[in-house]
Amino acid sequence: MSTAPIADVRDGQKSAPYEFFILAVSVHSIVNLALLFLVPFESQSWWLIMYVDAVLTIIFVIDFVFRLLTAPSKRWYLVHGGGTFDFLACLPGLRVFRLFRIVRAARLVRRLGGPQVFRELRQGLAAGTLYLVIFLGLFTLEFVGLLELHYERTASGGNITTAGDALWWGYVTATTVGYGDRFPVTQGGRIVGVMMLTIGVALFATFSGFLANVFLSAKGPTPAEPQVATGDDLHATFRRVEQLHAQQQAELETLRARIAELAPPSLRSGRKRGYPLPSTSNV
């Protein structure tokens, strides 16, 4: 069984929450690449997908720079650590190279093992929650915006007719600001609006909780949690109790012998004839 440390097994990979975030963004980008071939070229739906994909590209650029700056060896990262593929994946025309990031996340799970990955996810719960909110926010803005365009773009009196209108309406609705300059007029569009309101409230409530946790944790250390005794600790405690009990019994026998020496002659002779000494249980 290998005993290599986790840092060596990773081969430059980051924490499990971060790698899974990049995995989700990569899958989102690949899905967008397929959608661009399904929707009419330069339609409003096509432009909405392109706008969101531009944000995903910015995330990939930040990820590449982050990995390059934190790599122990920049040359090793570019040649052997997948840096070249990460750079190519940042180019809009070479989005297919983002499949490499999916392979890297699968390699992380295989090398660390499921229990270690879940342990890291639990330890990085706060960061993982932030990554999840960012990903779900982008995902919701895009696909709810596409649905809203589907219902509102050709509706009579509709005011959500462009990709920019859909993204603006989606963000304003999700934040519950509700300027009212863009709103659905069709039944289907209003149902989609209810979906956006529900998801948006949940996402921003989670994000607010994350910020509150960060600021409260920065005020000072939290009280230490009570430690739970392990099996070894309990075994050592039982041995100590047995030693104390044996020591107490030895001291009691010594005390009895001392009392016998100090007893009057009549009591000592009575002991020889089989009469017991007074009990020392109350001494």
Image: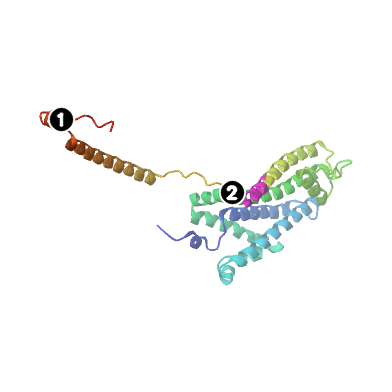
Q: Quadrant of residue 147?
A: top right
Residue under label 2, please give it: 125
- The x and y percentages for residue 157 are 89, 41
- The x and y percentages for residue 165 are 83, 49
The residue at 20%/39% (across/down) is 258
In the shown orientation, is residue 230 left or right of residue 280? right
Q: Secondary structure at mark 1?
A: helix
In the shown orientation, is residue 8 left or right of residue 64? left
Vertical position of residue 57 compared to residue 198: above or below: below
Q: Secondary structure at mark 2?
A: helix
Q: Is residue 40 visible?
A: no
Residue under label 1, please give it: 267
Mark nearest the camera among 2 and 1 is 1
The answer to whether residue 213 is magenta is yes
Question: What's the image's color scheme?
Answer: rainbow
- Report the amino acid beneath label 2: Leu
What range of the chain is rendered magenta?
209-220
Vertical position of residue 93 compared to residue 181: above or below: below
Label 1: how many Cα within 10 Å (few below 14, some 14–19, many 20+): some
The residue at 26%/41% (across/down) is 246
